[in-house]
Image (cartoon, grey):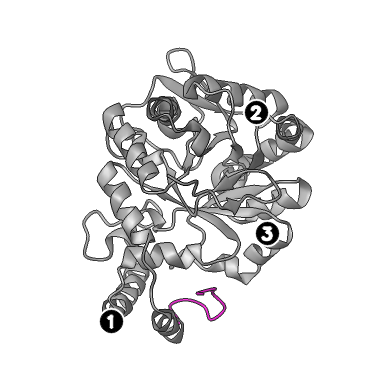
Amino acid sequence: MSDQRSQPLGKSKAKVSPIGLGTVGMAGFNSKVNYRQFEEAISVAYEGGIRHFDAAPFYGYGKAEFYLGHAIRELGIREHITLSTKAGRILKPANRNAEVKGRYAIDWVDPLPFVAEYDYSYDGIMRSLEGSQFRLGLDFIDVLLLHDVGEAWHGDQAGIYWKQLGDSGYKALEELRTGGFVSAVGLGVNDTDSVLRASSEFDFDCALIAGRYSLLNHAPLEGAFDELRRRDVSVIAAGVFNSGILATGTRGGNLSYDYQTVPEHILNRVREIETVCERFDVKLVSAAIEFVKLHPAVSTVLLGAQNADAVRENIRAASTSAPKAFWQEMKARALIPGNAPTE
C-alpha cells in the first residue's frame, strides 16, 4: 500500500496522513478495550490509509502506549507510519505514589497500575520520553508533544509549569530534535491560547489542539490559525466531534459536548446543522470532519475510536465531500462564519 503521509508538520521532516487515529478512546476512556480489540482497530486504520497514530503516557496510565507499540510491531508497520506521543507527565507506581490531578480528572477503566506526576523540566521531559520508549518498545518517536501545559488544564498552577518549560524544558525538546531523536516537537493541549503563547517564545513545529475548531467552535478563525500559519506551526486537529455530539447527532444516546451534558443552545444549533445536512444528503459526521480538514492551517484531523467498527465508520465519513451549495447554505444560515475555509 502506498505511503499516505503527504502533509508536513511545520518545518520538520515529519509528515502525516490527512486523517490520523488517536488512542485515548481505546485506553479505557468510558469503556474497557482489550489488546485484541486494540490491535484490530490499528490494523483497520492502517488498511484504510491512516498513517498517523497518537498516544500519551496519560492515556490509561501507560496502556495506550503499551498496546500501540506492541500492535505496531505485530503488524510490521513501523517504517510506514508517523508516531506521536507526549511529555509532561511521568508515570510512577500507584502503590507508592499519590496522583496529582488537573482540572479535568478522568477515571480510566482498567488502567495500568500507575499514577501521573506533572514535570515539564529538562529532566522531566527526558524521563517522560524514555518511559514512553520503554512502554512502546520503540527507540524512535517521530513527534513529541508537550501535554496539557497552560491554564486550560492547570488553572492557577499553570505558572509553575510555564516556568519549568522556560527554565529548562524547552532545552530538552530542542536537544531531542536537533539530535535527531525525534523529528518534530510541539504541544498537545485543549486550548489555542497556550499554543499562541508557547510558539511566540519557542520554535515549535506543530500543535495538537483538541476541540477548539469544529462545526460548533470557530474562535480560531478570529486570527489564531492565521497566526500559527505565519509561524509555520501546523495544527493537528483533534476533538472535532466535541466529544460526541457531532458524531451522534441530537438523536443519539448518551449525548456529550466537551465531556459534559449538552447545553440546550448547543442542541438547538446541532439540530439546525442536521436540517441542512438532511437537505443536501450529507452525514453530520462527514461534515464535521471535512469542515476542519479544509482549513489550510490543519495538517491532519486526528479521530478517536473505541473499536475497529468505529474506525471503519470514521474512514468512510472522512472519504466523502459535501457539495459547495451545502457550505454556502451553512454560511447563509450563520451556522459557520463567512470566512471559514470551505474549498
Question: Which quadrant, please, contains the N terminus?
Answer: top left
Pointers 1 and 3 in contact (CB under 8 A)?
no
In this orientation, does residue 327 appear? yes
Q: Position of residue 245 (x, y in %)?
A: 33, 60
Q: Position of residue 314 (x, y in %)?
A: 34, 54
Q: Residue at x 71, y 49 (%)?
A: 11
Mark closer to the observer (2, 1): 1
Q: How many marks?
A: 3
Q: Which residue is mark 2?
A: 125
Q: Position of residue 334 (x, y in %)?
A: 45, 82
Residue found at the far front of this picture: 1
| Residue 337, magenta (yes or no) | yes
Looking at marks 2 and 1 on the same chain, the residue that comes earlier in the sequence is marked by 2
Tell me if 143 is positioned left or right of 343 in this view: right
Q: Which residue is mark 3?
A: 228
Q: Residue at x 62, y 43 (%)?
A: 14
Amino acid type at image mark 2: Ile
The region drawn magenta spans 334-343
* Mark seen at residue 331: none
Residue toward you, 291 or 332: 291
Regarding mark 1 in the picture, which secondary structure is present there?
Answer: helix
Q: Name the dominant secondary structure of the magenta segment.
A: loop
Tell me if 202 is positioned left or right of 9 in this view: right
Residue toward you, 331 or 117: 331
Q: Residues within 10 Å of mark 1 (few under 14, many from 20)?
A: few
